[in-house]
Image: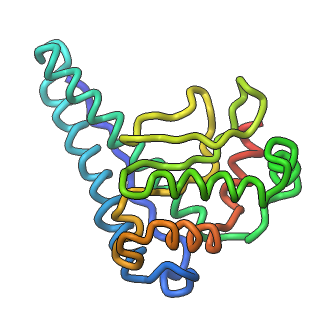
Amino acid sequence: MTEAATIEMQPLEFDATTVPGLSEKLLTSHHQNNYGGALRRFSAIEAELAKSGADQLQGFQLNGLKREELIAHNSVVLHEIYFAGLSGDAAPSKSLGKQIAADFGSEDAWRNEIAAMGRALAGGSGWALLTWSPRAGRLINSWAADHAMLAAGGTVLAALDMYEHAYAIDYGANAGGYVDAYLGALRWTAASEAFDKAR
């Protein structure tokens, strides 16, 4: 038997009453219930794997637990990136801004593409992600579903959560209004730091 892995819950790094377009009620519910819920699921799955031992499980049991472990882990990480993107500086660093311009034409062009991706996910579930791909040598906007479809080998810099829990309290079915609010509230400090580390 192995020891269960643990991940500590990260607090919000901003005052939830001050984010334009996103209410304190929405942000705290999202943080506590959805991010927190993913963390609790991950911890429970890790405890089950540690207790049972992979060699004691049927193949379908192990596959199921490992699939759910991946989904819960990625949900935790993507939520942390999402919330980190709501605090810090409003503009990307010089190096990230230059890369955005090189790969998308301009920050406005990037915003238009990521917003269109978010709106395309309305009524469904998933993420629209800004990712640095060392293999491609460029930034890419990628679509992710089930918390498990990420660009292999990439570093996610910004994450737009398009699951309904991210916007329904404030926007109901108006996912497009939420996308606009998210982009208006986006802050680039964490993304810029991650980009500089990944390059």
Residue 197's place in the image compared with 10, above or below, is: above
Residue 173's place in the image compared with 7, above or below, is: below
Image quadrant in which you'd find residue 49 = top left
Q: Quadrant of the C terminus?
A: top right
Percent x, y of residue 137: 78, 29
Residue drawn at 60 percent across, 55 percent down: 116
Number of residue marks: 0
Residue drawn at 39 percent across, 54 percent down: 8
Percent x, y of residue 152: 56, 27
Q: Is residue 92 left or right of residue 167?
A: right
- The residue closer to the viewer here, 50 or 68, is 68
Percent x, y of residue 24: 43, 83
Residue 171's place in the image compared with 190, above or below, is: below
Q: Is residue 43 left or right of residue 147?
A: left
Percent x, y of residue 151: 57, 31
Residue drawn at 29 percent across, 29 percent down: 67
Q: Is residue 149 left or right of residue 71?
A: right
Q: Is residue 80 left or right of residue 108?
A: left
Residue drawn at 27 percent across, 27 percent down: 66
Q: Quadrant of the N terminus?
A: top left
Colouring method of the image: rainbow
